[in-house]
């Protein structure tokens, strides 16, 4: 005798935009901050004196294609 087993159907979870929006804004701000430090923090546009930030993200600049030499 064979018995058939039915598996429960899983429905996708609906995520309200109100719960997703703060995380999307946070991610966007963090992305822009990272992009600034890797791509722009050098020379006349620098917020910090010295070249500490530039040297810290130097390899990342080359990896992402930002010129710095």
Image (spheres, rainbow, N blue to C red):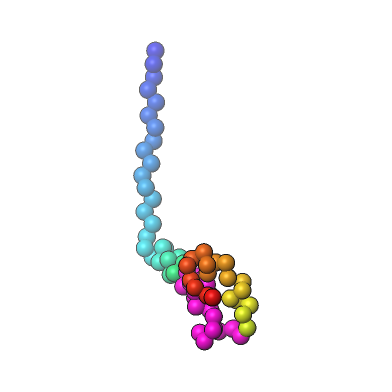
Work out which residue is located at the far top of the displayed protein and give it: 1
- In this view of the protein, can residue 22 be seen by the observer? no
- Which percent across, then down, holds residue 49? 61, 85
Query: Is 50 in the magenta?
Result: no
Q: Main secondary structure of the magenta part?
A: helix
In the rendered structure, the answer to whether residue 5 lies left or right of residue 47 reads left
Quadrant of residue 5 in the image? top left
Residue 36 or residue 8, whichever sits in front: 36
Instruction: Please count the marks in the image.
Output: 0
Query: Is 32 in the magenta?
Result: yes
In the rendered structure, the answer to whether residue 32 lies left or right of residue 14 reads right
- Looking at the image, which residue is at 52% across and 72% down? 38
Up the image or down, 34 lies above or below 48; here it is above
- Looking at the image, which residue is at 37% across and 60% down? 16
In the rendered image, the quadrant that contains the N terminus is top left
Which region shows up in magenta? 30-49
- Looking at the image, which residue is at 38% across and 50% down? 13
- In this view of the protein, can residue 27 be seen by the observer? yes
In the rendered image, the quadrant that contains the C terminus is bottom right
Up the image or down, 8 lies above or below 45; here it is above
- Looking at the image, which residue is at 42% across and 63% down? 19
């Amino acid at each position: 005798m064979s018995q058939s087993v039915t598996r429960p159907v899983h429905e996708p979870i609906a995520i309200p935009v109100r719960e997703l929006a703060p995380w999307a804004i946070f991610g966007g701000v963090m992305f822009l901050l990272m992009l600034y430090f890797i791509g722009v923090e050098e020379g006349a546009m620098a917020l910090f004196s010295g070249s500490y930030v530039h040297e810290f993200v130097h390899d990342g600049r080359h990896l992402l294609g930002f010129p710095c030499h």
